[in-house]
Amino acid sequence: LSRVAQYHSGSMVNSGAKVPLGLKRKSLRVVVTGGAGFVGSHLVDRLMARGDSVIVVDNFFTGRKENVLHHFGNPRFELIRHDVVEPLLLEVDQIYHLACPASPVHYKHNPVKTIKTNVVGTLNMLGLAKRVGARFLLTSTSEVYGDPLEHPQTEAYWGNVNPIGVRSCYDEGKRTAETLTMDYHRGANVEVRIARIFNTYGPRMCLDDGRVVSNFVAQALRKEPLTVYGDGKQTRSFQYVSDLVEGLMRLMEGEHVGPFNLGNPGEFTMLELAQVVKETIDPNAKIEFRPNTEDDPHKRKPDITKAKDLLGWQPKVSLRKGLPLMVEDFRRRVFGDEKDGSI
Ligand code: NAD
Ligand code: UDP
Ligand code: UDP
């Protein structure tokens, strides 16, 4: 059997969920698209630490070389500047497909490019998975639930999404990416996994990405007012990045296709979040109200029962524990003495 075939037939020690993460296993060749970005670079750190060979494919739209600089020179690490909208030939065992701008500011910047990345980019990576028999994991999003009419959201909920709005390039793009993933699974027997990721924060988030956690943390450090959009009563659930990476790896190694919600069920209003940021960084920080953006979902909170039951996963890091873990990285970058991303 080829290495790939052995892997998928379950005869290798690392197949399925039988070997707990962290135990000795045969090294795999893994592609991480979007691996120079925020989530991707933390995932790459874990894959490198467990001994895999990692190929990062990234066009550096929102990703940065600094995020993976500490792996340069390691023979198990490769970085390819490539846009997933173009076809790509590689020989690999697993594909973590993350390439896609994630923050509203970035994905609205060029909406047509965003939807091409989600549709054509995902199609290409599924074509690659089919050709080489690799296992494929899609990082979808809680945005597939749109402005949800069910609360909290389970994976069985089909969503309430505006197909023609300013966020549609992202949320409809991800919905199509999920459809493609399931069609390659059913039609071409590609082994697939789907994660629906809820708001995630941590070191290496883009400083200028407009997301609420990065905005508030950077504002508090700069002694600027925290900008709360709308009345600040809308809610989100914030997950620390190490919890997400653990969930993604368990999903990839496990036996279940998904989709799985990966998020922290702790739900906060934006005013509560502002309060936690104040307590963490600057108790004297002021709050400034701004008009909210169009189509902003009112509330969002994952039901993670399925991931708990089938992946044995749940988040460990609360917002109050996680926020301080990103402050040092942000301080270094806000005040401009960053050297690399080795956190
Ligand atoms: P990010 O913007 O930091 O990372 C995305 C990476 O993809 C960047 O390195 C970027 O340069 C790269 N990229 C974008 N378009 C590309 C293209 N056409 N070809 C090659 N590379 C491309 O965002 P992130 O927060 O790390 O998100 C990673 C994934 O997780 C995304 O798919 C996103 O939709 C999903 N997700 C993230 C969150 C979150 O809260 N961070 C929530 C839900 C889903
Ligand atoms: N593809 C790719 N790398 C590969 C195999 C396929 O980028 O190793 C791309 C290919 O160019 C195509 C897409 O993936 O645009 C879908 O491939 P598939 O073989 O499923 O479809 P087809 O080429 O038959 O349309
Ligand atoms: N938000 C805010 N102040 C900011 C940035 C965002 O109050 O400086 C709000 C935004 O209106 C939304 C929530 O925070 O209700 C989360 O926004 P984000 O862009 O972080 O994520 P998403 O909308 O994709 O969940």
Image: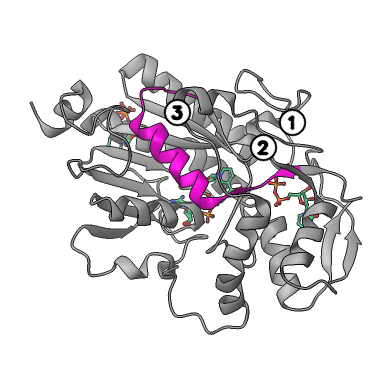
Is 62 part of what is drawn in magenta? no
Whether residue 153 is situated above or below residue 77 in the rendered picture: above
Q: State yes or no: discs 1 and 2 in contact (Cβ < 8 Å).
A: no
Cα separation between marks 3 and 2: 16 Å
Cα separation between marks 3 and 1: 31 Å
Residue 181 in percent (x, y) is at 43, 26
- Give the amino acid type for the residue marked by disc 1 in the picture: Asn
Q: Which residue is mark 1?
A: 162
Sequence-first tag of 3 and 1:
1
- Density class for disc 1 (Cα within 10 Å; few <14, some 14-19, many ≥20) is some
Q: Which residue is mark 3?
A: 311
Outermost residue on the top side: it is: 186
Eye-nearest disc, 3 or 1 = 3
Q: Can residue 82 be spotted in the picture?
A: no
Residue 300 lies left or right of residue 310; in this view the side is right
Q: Secondary structure at mark 1?
A: loop
Sequence-first tag of 1 and 2:
1
Is 253 part of what is drawn in magenta? yes
The CB of the residue at mark 1 lies under 8 Å from ligand 3? no
